[in-house]
Amino acid sequence: MDIAVILENTIRALFNAEALILALAAIGLNVHFGYTGLLNFGQVGFAAMGAYGIGSGVVYLDLPFGVSLLLGIALAVLLALALGIPTLRLRADYLAIVTIASSEVIRLTARSAELRELTGGSSGVNGFSQGFYSMNPFSPGSYGIGWLSYDANRFFLLVVGWTLVALCSVLVFLLMRSPWGRVLRGIREDEDAVRSLGKNVVGYKMQSLVLGGIFGAFAGFAFALANSSVQPDNYGTQFTFLAFTAMILGGAGRVIGPVVGAIVFQTSLVLVENVLIQAKGAGYISDRILESTDIGAVRFVLVGVALMALMIYRPQGLFGDKKELALDAR
Amino acid sequence: MPADLQDEPGADGVGSRAIGTSVTDGSARARAAAAALATVPPRPGVPKPDPILVADGVLRQFGGLTAVDVEHFEVQRGVITALIGPNGAGKTTFFNLLTGFDKPNSGTWSFEGKELAGMPAYRVARRGMVRTFQLTKALSRMTVLDNMRLGATGQRGENFFRALLPASWTAQQKGIDARAVDLLGRFKLDSKAGDFAGSLSGGQRKLLEMARALMVEPTLVMLDEPMAGVNPALTQSLLGHVKDLREQGMTVLFVEHDMDMVRDISDWVVVMAQGRIVAEGPPDVVMADPAVIDAYLGAHHDAPLSLEEEEAQIGGARVETLTDGRDEA
Ligand SMILES: Nc1ncnc2c1ncn2[C@@H]1O[C@H](COP(=O)(O)OP(=O)(O)O)[C@@H](O)[C@H]1O
Ligand SMILES: [Mg+2]
């Protein structure tokens, strides 16, 4: 059992691309759910819009990289409008149903053979990230310190990505302490009360859906660039639920909640996985109990149990306020 | 709720409210209100000399049930009008329709001469017709002050882009805060400004909801059972606040079961039963009307007839407020 390997992999996971993708998606969900009370179960649909925006934009539409980014954002905005216009006037559950269905529709449509000329069908999109990495100001070599060392391209992606996470968090912070954010929080508490005070509730919910959806598209950008590839089956519903987990773990309705939640969640997965691999390698766990091929699934079970325990003792998440949560019972 | 007893230093305890008094305060507004209605005959749907709200043929059915069927209804400007009737008479539904929270099967209504039918609730509120809810809607996980701030209309910082430039809204917010603190002071909630609204007692939430509605600067205030679930020790001060609204030139339309309160503060009483307006007139005339007594005895018989019965009902109403979500729809 090699403790150093476990430590190295776990520490590397702190800032890896998975955590950054999850953080961006969760920041968006936090705007939707944590601040506005919107149940968006299709955040992955927004990520897919971002990913296919740059992927298909560059490869199939021959757009410059920068224009493809704008295409991804525009697609996310259109998706928010398409989901919001028919549902935001209705009870909250309608948005939940429509978003979860739409994200699967998007994935299945993108992987269909008919759209091969636009999305690459089931083999996805490849070869679009050149436009991004050609902007890399870091010359080839190793960057970072100790275990946290990366090659130039990965370092560039992480610097850009975490800077984006910071900028999005600052934006959320500024918005939520403004009167605009106050209206969103009011809607989360009771939208009819806010309506009775003369606020255009549907309009605000729409703005919230669009803003959080754009953050979801940012997650899609990061996902696509980290893999240099867009694979439709990476954009299934589990993506959304992992983002929900990260947000609730960190604390919904807190600016840094989703960021810390994403890092802690991803890091715990890597830690548990590496402990299992090492324990297995050292022969502490027999094949009768756990086969090596099952480790990938079992780590979710173990982290899931730990999260359940955490939610029982800290239902408000890492950064939430328990007293505030208790007030929810009107 | 013993905490309620301490809410109101000025109130002098349970059972002390004025009983059987008609509009006795001699303020100019009260006298003007009484004078304006003096010549109006007491019959359902009667036109008023200076109506602020006029409704025609408002019909709302839920499946086979006709919840509201109002042929003609006018509210006189500058007076306190009570809307009474047994449970299930359609009062809340009528409020919901008039304020845009529900859509009628048919009907038109106008406020200050402008058609309102089909207008979304938030625009109705911006026009100056603001309502409160039978089941209080305090925004629990927001502070009392934030609840109040939300009531102010025309806030520059409520625009997405300007929200990012605090310089564009902080000055306006200062003015709003001053107004909020002043109102909270009048409602004896100023010491609670920084607390979460969810930590207030039931009576304090009612006060907060009323104060918050006033932040909108309404011309017509519609209160749905402002006394329901409120400790009797607080009712006197709530009564005072409602009368104050008239003193400040606002028009008040309120739903209430408490007959003493209705008699005490209203200039005009409208009675609904089974969705229709069955009687209206000055309080003493309406309360003596056989049709009214009939409406109450005929249905759930929930008008308090004696003080004991009323106390029992107030207790019951409080439980209902805590557990029953139906009226919220
Ligand atoms: N959303 C709804 N769906 C079905 N029936 C309703 C709904 N809201 C109210 N009702 C019915 O309409 C009638 C009037 O209710 P309501 O307006 O709440 O009466 P009130 O406020 O006078 O007690 C009642 O019979 C009630 O059950
Ligand atoms: Mg009612």
Image (cartoon, coloured by chain):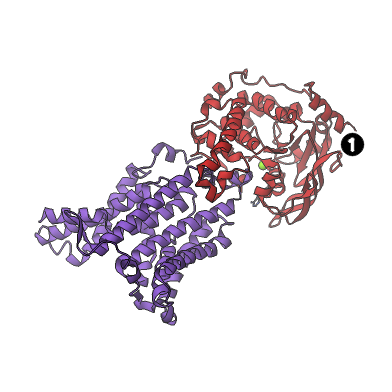
Front residue of B49 and B83 = B49
Task: Classify residue B269 as left or right of residue A240.
Answer: right
In the picture, which chain is red?
B
Among the 4 quarters of the image, the one containing residue B153: top right
Residue at image point 68% right, 45% down: B126
* Chain bearing mark 1: B
Q: In this view, does B240 lie above or below A51?
A: above
Residue at image point 72% right, 21% down: B18
Is disc 1's CB within 8 Å of ligand 1? no
Please state which amino acid type lies under the numbered disc 1: Pro
Q: Tell me residue B327's x, y (percent).
A: 62, 45
Task: Classify residue B80 as left or right of residue A259.
Answer: right
Q: In this view, does B299 lie above or below A295?
A: above
> Local crowd at mark 1 within 10 Å, few (<14), some, or many (≥20)?
few
Q: Tell me residue B105's x, y (percent).
A: 73, 57
Q: Can residue B223 be seen in this view?
A: yes
Q: Tell me residue A162's x, y (percent).
A: 33, 54
Q: Tell me residue B110's x, y (percent).
A: 78, 48
How many labels sit on residues?
A: 1
Front residue of B9 and A29 = A29
Residue at image point 62% right, 31% down: B314
User: In which quadrant of this rendering is ligand 2 seen?
Assistant: top right
Task: Classify residue B295 as left or right of residue A4.
Answer: right
Task: Classify residue A117 as left or right of residue A130.
Answer: right
Tint applied to chain A in the drawing: purple
Residue bearing the label numbered 1 = B41
Residue at image point 9% right, 59% down: A282
| Secondary structure type for disc 1 | loop
Front residue of A153 and A185 = A153
Front residue of B264 and B127 = B127
Q: In this view, does A23 lie above or below A293?
A: above
